[in-house]
Image (cartoon, grey):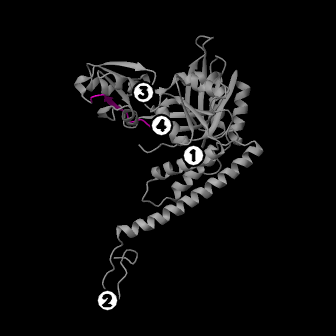
Amino acid sequence: MSSRTARKPTAAGAAAEPPSIETLRARMDEINLKILRLVSLRASLAVEIGRLKHNNGGEVYQPVRELAIIEKMIAENQGPLTDEQVKRIYVEIISACRALEHEPRVAFLGPEHTYSHEAARMRFGSSVELMPLESFAAVFQAIENGRADFGVVPVENSTEGSVTLTLDLLIDTALVIIGEILLPVRPSIMSLSGKREAVTRIIAHQQLLAQCRGYLSANFPNCETEAVASNGLAAQRAAADGSLAAIASAAAGEAYGLRTIASNVQDLATNMTRFIVMGTRPVERSGPGRADKTTLLFAVADRVGTLNQALNLFARNAINISKIESRPIRARPWEYLFFVDVMGHRDDPKLARAIKSLERKALFLKVLGSYPEGRSAAA
């Protein structure tokens, strides 16, 4: 036995008795008080920082700074808490302290207990005013008219690809992307009784139905499916009708009193949805050791080689393109806009040079935002 784990001998040479539960609880109570004092001190500093931000016209929400804090705590974590547990603790500490400066209003596709709701809480914590809205368009409108400070909307799923409605809304908005959230999607099929034989119809958002298409075909071949506005709404309806089953998160099922028929019903185990955080003001570069991403929207002349020439501008500047997606220009049939995700911040010299060159070649160019690259939550 090493010196670190050996018990201290008594005067008679016998091993000392292990500490009692009461002794350990007394130590825990002392630590609880220390934690409270330190968190209160942190909150006091947040209030002072908030005052200085207000005087200088600074933003209360600083995603780069917040992510840097969380990642530093994860890097320092030696257990026994997991990195994900440490992350959740600090998200809530930061959220509570941020609310002392200003409680942000965050819009998302409602009702509550949708995956958008989960993503919003993952990023902003509980100390915010969460605003469930009826559509993606309503989320954008709420930020544009000042009813919300930020919005969280899905933009891409690893199984089904892009959420085209979100892409279309990005074309005309003056808002900017200030962050992204990668959320593993592990849906369950749930109903009021939890009995498979009682279900005649399965309902969910159309994206989630598509992500579970193979499972439903193999396991519920005789059930109808119906697309609804959100998975939270699906859970609500299933709670009112015993013949319906909802595909939704376990949290939604618990909130509406549903019982689980089957868990993890996504077709691919790696199923993940990428959400973007929308705001009104750009965010700064993350700095050394942290990756940024920039999303661009552009159009080029419909001539041979023009798209290739545009994309080569990034290769010449050693910039990686992580995604390209086309969307039709509605007023001009068979002509397209291109959404491109590239690595780096628009203020990075190489990317700034590439964007400036693209601006000279493109018919239209819009930088939708530069933001810290998202990292996946624990599955």
Task: Judge the density around disc 1: few (<14), some (14-19), many (≥20) Cα neighbours within 10 Å.
Answer: many
Q: Earlier in the sequence, mark 4 or mark 3?
A: 4
Mark before the other along the chain sequence, 4 or 1: 1
Compared to 20, does 235 lie above or below?
above
Q: Could you tell me if residue 212 is visible in this image?
A: no
Q: Are marks 1 and 3 in contact (CB under 8 Å)?
A: no
Residue 71, relative to residue 196: is it above or below?
A: below
- What are the residue bounds of the magenta stretch? 183-193
Name the residue: 67% across, 25% down: 145
| Residue 188 falls inside the magenta stretch | yes
In this figure, which residue is indicated by the disc labeled 3?
A: 231
Secondary-structure class at tag 2: loop
Numbered disc in front, either 4 or 1: 1
Is 317 in front, or is 42?
42
Is residue 309 depicted above or below 287 in this figure?
Answer: above
SS assignment at label 3: helix
Q: Which residue is mark 1?
A: 95
Marks 2, 4: nearer the viewer = 2
Q: CA distance from mark 2 to mark 3?
A: 67 Å
Query: Residue 12 got which mark?
Result: 2
Can the viewer see residue 4? yes
Q: Does the stretch in magenta take in 326? A: no
Q: As drawn, is 321 to the left or to the right of 285? A: left
Residue identified by numbered label 4: 118
* Marks 2 and 4, how far apart at CA: 59 Å
Residue 292 percent coordinates (x, y): 61, 42
**Residue 361 in the image: x percent, y percent?**
71, 25
Q: Secondary structure at mark 1?
A: helix
User: In the rendering, at what x and y percent does residue 46 appear?
Assistant: 65, 51
Q: Find the distance from the CA under tag 4 to the CA under tag 1.
A: 15 Å
Q: Nearer the viewer, residue 155 or 359?
A: 155
Q: Earlier in the sequence, mark 2 or mark 4?
A: 2
